[in-house]
Amino acid sequence: MLGNLPFPGVTAGQGGDQLVSKAVTAAISALFKQTNKLEVKVKAEPVAKLFQGSVDGFDFMGQGLLMHSGLRVEVMELYVQAVSIDFGAIFKGNIQLRQPTQASMRIVLTEDDLTASFNTPFLIEKLQQLAHEGQPLTFEKTQITINDDQSLRMQSSIRQGASDKSVEVDITAFLEVKDRRRLRFVNVAYGGDSKAIELGHVLTDHVNELLDLDQFALDGMQLRVDQLRLRNKQMTLYGIAHIDKFPQRET
């Protein structure tokens, strides 16, 4: 029976912990368009408890994770607490949780990840929902810079309505976490002329509404942030992931 499992590299000689580790790795890998490194280690003692669906926890470590939306994460680590799974579903290539669980998490995004994310169709579409003076705004060439003083700089070329002239908006701000799930620009400084400053205020308000982590989490998960750090050209989020169900592949 084990020899016919639908997971590459799994053989009948492997133990239950290796089987589940392979299954979870394969299921998580399917959530991403591309991964540089992905490893899952299931913990169960004694191993026989796996066959009743009981897991002491598992560690998930991924690097260079590219989502189907185009968003990229440099590092994602999840350390999942004790969880109950449907062991029989694994033989069908499915991971099903019998009850919700949670995990401590660490997520790292580089300066390049943030810049690329703001230029993906996924985020451009959300930005272009913004209008000013009754006219839609078009965002191009958005650049994110993480400064040595732990502030973040956002530069973007913005066209208003049908105009072919761009306004160069330049915002420098610090980030704070509100309600453990919203990232907000605070202590904002604006560069440029009066029009750039005007559009900078509009953009700040919109981004502060946009950066709700629940909009970016995988299906079945809620992310709650307890600490945020900006240093060494990276943004690192520490917190908790609440997992109601195992995420499904995006369609």
Image (tube, rainbow, N blue to C red):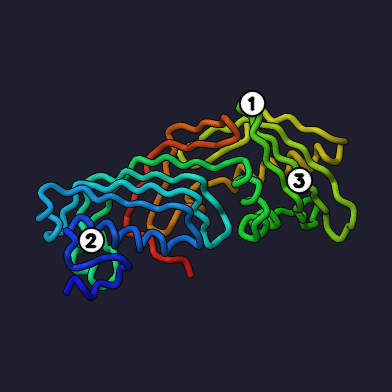
- Quick one: SS at disc 3? strand
Location of the N terminus (image quadrant): bottom left
In the rendered image, residue 228, in percent from the top left (x then y), is placed at 50, 33
In the rendered image, residue 23, in percent from the top left (x then y), is placed at 29, 62
Determine the CA span between mark 1 and mark 3. 21 Å
- Quick one: SS at disc 1? loop
* Amino acid type indicated by mark 3: Ser
Which residue is the site of mark 3?
A: 156
**Residue placed furthest toward the top:** 149
Q: Residue at x 89, y 57 (%)?
A: 164
Q: Earlier in the sequence, mark 3 or mark 2?
A: 2
- Residue 141 can be seen in this image: yes
Q: Nearer the viewer, residue 68 or 161?
A: 68
* Amino acid type indicated by mark 1: Asp
Q: Residue at x 56, y 36 (%)?
A: 234
* Amino acid type indicated by mark 2: Leu
Which residue is the site of mark 1?
A: 148
Q: Residue at x 38, y 57 (%)?
A: 220
Q: Earlier in the sequence, mark 1 or mark 2?
A: 2
Q: Horizontally, is 79 left or right of 151 in the view?
A: left
